[in-house]
Amino acid sequence: MNKAIGVIDSGVGGLTVAYELMRQLPKEQLIYLGDTARCPYGPRVNDEVRTFTWEMVDFLMKKDIKMLIVACNTATAFTLNELKSNMSIPVIGVIKPGARAAINETKTNHIGVIGTEGTIRSNAYTKALNDIHAGLQVQSLACPSFVPMVEQGMLNGEQAEAMVTRSLYSLTQQEELDTLILGCTHYPLIKHTIQHVMGRDVAIISSSEETAREASTILEFRNLLYKGHNTPFHQFYSTGQMEVFATITEEIFKEFIDHFHSVTIEKAIL
Amino acid sequence: MNKAIGVIDSGVGGLTVAYELMRQLPKEQLIYLGDTARCPYGPRVNDEVRTFTWEMVDFLMKKDIKMLIVACNTATAFTLNELKSNMSIPVIGVIKPGARAAINETKTNHIGVIGTEGTIRSNAYTKALNDIHAGLQVQSLACPSFVPMVEQGMLNGEQAEAMVTRSLYSLTQQEELDTLILGCTHYPLIKHTIQHVMGRDVAIISSSEETAREASTILEFRNLLYKGHNTPFHQFYSTGQMEVFATITEEIFKEFIDHFHSVTIEKAIL
């Protein structure tokens, strides 16, 4: 029997990770849980994020998943180590994959990281980068306006560009910086605007894309890849407003839903 | 105590993997063994490659390595599964990392693979790609002239360009192909020439770069990353002509050798 990959997020940001999982691992099935009722996690304190995350994990563990992906940078920063040491299935966060991809990409060894206040305050990216490579210069910047912007559907256009330009100003002044990590799973949805503001010589690393890539690596390493030929059946759960969640989910996964016809979107009671 | 990462190759091609390991994991130490006396493995039969590979593995296991990287595509194609099931340390080949990176990269789902006759004949890339993603179109091509070309130091210039153009002709005619895997660890040394021949719209995937990236992923997953602050001490062994091997090694690792002053290059008796 094929078990699913479980994906948790504070809201809809982690859908970019789910999208990449479907694209890079089209045989695997997913169970996604977005805690939209309590989103955003970015400004919350450590203990609150931990409690909420464990509630989501418990919900998914009852569905017998084979791997857990913490698709929220804030939750990864605060809970990943604890989850890893307490769970028997592989647990993957979104921070280390982005860090490793940036190290692979950079030529100047000067890397930028943008994320929520919580993620940046936790210093998790700087630590992850320097644990592997002590010679890196890392510039972190919290961009608290980006998540609300994305949740409101403001993904491009003049207003979005102006807001991104204002937020990233200090990073655009760093001439040596050649790689920027999108340290929040909402940000891939405004990647084009960010790329435009940073200029085409700066490589933009999407932690969503890289996390899916590493999920593939670890599944193979642990011999957990699905080898059958059944059509995957994906389940999407949200703790909050179903209408908005369903609209966004259907919008993001249009191509896959059209293709597979096997998705459910339901309310989750934690 | 910090144990080393062991790297085996049929000759000098795997040095591109070692280079990437040093670049992406600068704290880790390496023990490299190149079977230059019996290179190339590409045209050899399965059993011979298996015997030679196990001899190299035995040599490195006596040195108590924490991870084995099979940095030769031919050896990976013929022996990886056997090594993985018989060894207690993590074993990584060069084929799956390249395959996963190509899946992440492609937009048209049309991927090219070039390698030695042995690698292409084994069908290992096509299998690795289709195991993960059944919807891919894969075009494989053996390029038997590339390894001798590289071993002779013919890395660019008119003659190299002409030879690469001739070899890759059938692939350049595939309009939908947007990603090309360098399925031989020698090929990153002629990457610029290959990129030039294929055109800038084709993404060139270096299995060396991607293998180092995945070594980083697995070391972290297995909690094997070195956390101390000692300068890494790298050992390079060759079974054949020491002079040529030492010259190539010093040429490739100039920047690292200048930096660390801690490399030995020795003859290996298997």
Image (spheres, coloured by chain):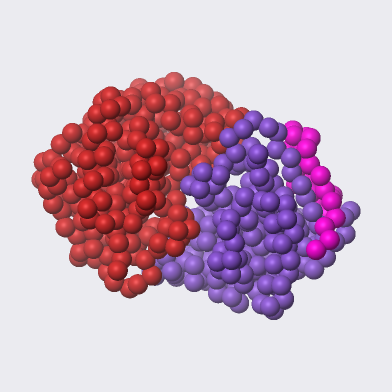
Chain colours: A purple, B red
Residue A170's x, y, as percent? Answer: 58, 72
Q: Confirm whether the magenta stretch covers residue A253.
A: yes
Residue A150's x, y, as percent? Answer: 76, 60
Image position of B209 with respect to A162: above or below = above
Q: Is residue B187 visible?
A: no
A241 or B152, nearer to the observer: A241
A103 or A5, nearer to the observer: A5
Q: Is residue A201 left or right of residue A250?
A: left
Total marks placed? 0
**Residue lying at 50% horizontally and 71% vertically, measured from the top left:** A126
Give the quadrant of the N terminus of chain A. top right
**Residue lying at 34% horizontally and 65% vertically, measured from the top left:** B27
**Residue lying at 69% horizontally and 57% vertically, measured from the top left:** A61
Residue A40's x, y, as percent? Answer: 75, 68
Q: Which residues are magenta?
A: A244-270
A32 or A98, nearer to the observer: A32
Residue A226's x, y, as percent? Answer: 60, 39
Q: Is residue A57 visible?
A: yes
Image position of B3 with respect to B180: above or below = below
Q: Confirm whether the magenta stretch covers residue B229.
A: no
Q: Is residue A52 left or right of residue B246?
A: right
Q: Is residue B183 left or right of residue A154?
A: left
**Residue lying at 21% horizontally and 34% vertically, measured from the top left:** B39
Q: Quadrant of residue B137?
A: top right
Q: Quadrant of residue B133?
A: top right
Give the quadrant of the C terminus of chain A. bottom right
